[in-house]
Image (spheres, rainbow, N blue to C red):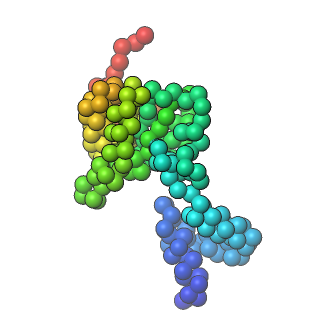
Amino acid sequence: MSYSPLLVRLIDGLRCMPGVGQKSAQRIAFHLLERDRDGASGLSAALADAVDGIGHCSRCRMFTESELCSICSASGRDTAQLCVVESPADVMAIEDATGFRGQYFVLMGHLSPLDGIGPEELGLSKLEEWLGNGEVKELIIATNPTVEGDATAHYLADLALRNSVTASRIAHGVPLGGELEYVDGGTLSHAFYGRRAVD
């Protein structure tokens, strides 16, 4: 059966979201049109407003509607600690799960030469300028434990060293509540060799 051009366009538009394939996009489109047209209109308006009104913080590159995001403009944050993450979602995860009160820098990705993503695409010249002003004492590297994340972490550590800033990386390894026999070998190896002294 062939769908109307507008319905095909809606389904194709929904497929741009991560994890949404043809069947999921079709299901969402049918739900919105059959049962929630008000929700669809609200979603459409919110999406259009967000695309037009949300940009990047001029300091840390987080999503914001202003020149500076709420974290960069907040008083009382520890300016001596700077945590580097790959995405805005990582900032939210750290803010929700930890008591971290420092600053952030959002890469919006990781180094990936095969995909044409180098230091300039990640804003690393801006980060180096920030590190060079002498205010940051510790660079906390919170990149993902992937090949690209590891390569990015090494590059960031070198950047910190060049600017006389201490670099640390968040720990990776056995999840809380995990049992060793069920943990994959790579994770267990990383946790084993990243061990630290017991206090």
Judged left or right of residue 108, residue 102 is: right
Q: Where residue 71 appears, x then y in whole percent?
A: 56, 39
Note whether 119 is above or below 157 in the view shown.
below
Q: Where residue 40 appears, x then y in whole percent?
A: 68, 70
Question: Which quarter of the figure is the C terminus placed in?
Answer: top left
Judged left or right of residue 35, residue 151 is: left
Q: Residue at x 55, y 45 (%)?
A: 68
Q: Where residue 30 appears, x then y in whole percent?
A: 64, 75
Residue 37, image quadrant: bottom right
In this view of the protein, can residue 29 be seen by the observer? yes
Q: Where residue 60 appears, x then y in whole percent?
A: 46, 43
Closest to the observer, 110 or 33:
110
Q: Residue furthest top?
A: 199
Residue 160, image quadrant: top left
Note whether 163 is above or below 116 in the view shown.
above
Judged left or right of residue 73, residue 80 is: left
Q: Residue at x 49, y 61 (%)?
A: 19
